[in-house]
Image (spheres, rainbow, N blue to C red):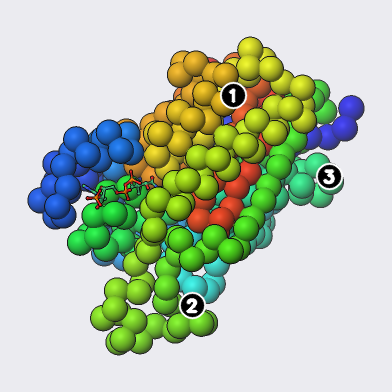
Amino acid sequence: MKTTATITAVAGYVPDYILSNSELEKLVPTTSEWIETRTGIKERRILKGKGLGTSDMCVEAINLLLKKRGIAATEIDMIIVATVTPDFVFPATSNVVCDKVGATNAWGYDLSAACSGFVFGLVTGAQFIETGKYKKVIVVGADKMSAILDYTDRSTCIIFGDGAGAVLLEPNTEGYGVIDSILGVDGSGRKYLHQKAGGSVKPPSHETVDAKEHFVFQDGQPVFKRAVVGMADVSAEIMKNNNLKSEDINWLVPHQANKRIIDVTAERMGLPSEKVMLNIQRYGNTTAGTIPLCLWDYENQLKKGDNVIISTFGAGFTWGAVYVKWGYDSK
Ligand code: UT7
């Protein structure tokens, strides 16, 4: 049988500090009720502490991952870090992470696909296993969204939070792991959700800081409209391509941007809420972190052989769905 890349361990990390909806009520003109009914979010985590960045959350998640799998950091071949909040523009956060966890035999890179970052990373990492090139690849989805949020802008600061999730990919010859995927981008959607300055088009300056152009800009409604259709479409498409009926699917692992988007996707797939992983109420939208954090939260309910559909839609626009046959029962 051909070699597939299967997930053999999952771990995550969320910072201790809880930013509740009621605390946000004190920062911006909003209400807990509005946030909860429009998004499903009750609270989110914020990484506090000077000098701490996305890599520090990756390190926590990876150290737990290695411990759970019972392997040393030196056994890792590669670490892909999906993030839009890297520690630095360069070097890559992956470099920093390899150093901090002691993965001295690994190489890696950062992957920028916003909310679809983990899905793009999972598919990319799987290629290195499928070709036989590597035996142990870690894919981390992590974002410190609080670093790029304007806590006077109620349209964005209520949505996002900080967190990291990681999976270990290893070869399998029994048909488990990443079975199929669909990925897509539409760069014309970039105008609706982006960071205006800080890149080569508009390098940082006093003016860009004064104009708050280093914060997340989002025109929520057009993003919502595209995301609702896009995430449902790509999920239905991967089911069709793999002859999967609703009853064949054990779990949907949706990107956690807005509970209303998740509900529409689940409905389109014909799935009851018990089959839908959901943690947006506790963590908000952690961008590249949402999907591996869901896998981490629900790991003990996953069974070997479960048909799992991971699906996402995010800034860029970027989107994707992955069909995974889950490879282990958790202990
Ligand atoms: O993960 C990356 C991809 N991102 C997404 O998928 C996010 C997609 N977008 C969304 O989830 C939603 O568009 C938001 C949650 C961002 C906004 O929800 P919405 O239902 O689309 O609200 P809206 O922007 O249409 O605004 C409706 C009303 C407006 O007031 P008026 O004009 O009707 O008087 C807003 O000013 O709600 C107001 N509003 C708020 N009110 C209280 C907007 N934000 C808030 C707020 N608190 N935080």
Residue at 48 percent across and 66 percent down: it is 191
Three-letter amino acid code at the position of disc 2: Gly
Q: Is residue 190 left or right of residue 48?
A: right
User: Which residue carries the number 2 mark?
Assistant: 199
Which label sits in the foreground, 2 or 3?
2
User: Which residue ends up furthest to the left in the rendered image?
Assistant: 26
Three-letter amino acid code at the position of disc 3: Gly
User: Which residue ends up furthest to the top in the rendered image?
Assistant: 247
User: Which of marks 3 and 2 precedes in the sequence?
Assistant: 3
Q: Is residue 97 left or right of residue 178?
A: left
Return the x and y of residue 297 as percentages of the image width and height: 43, 28
State whether label 3 is within 8 Å of ligand 1. no
Q: Nearer the viewer, residue 245 or 161?
A: 245
User: Which residue carries the number 3 mark?
Assistant: 132
* Element marked by disc 3: loop
Return the x and y of residue 49 as percentages of the image width and height: 25, 59
Q: Nearer the viewer, residue 294 or 249?
A: 249
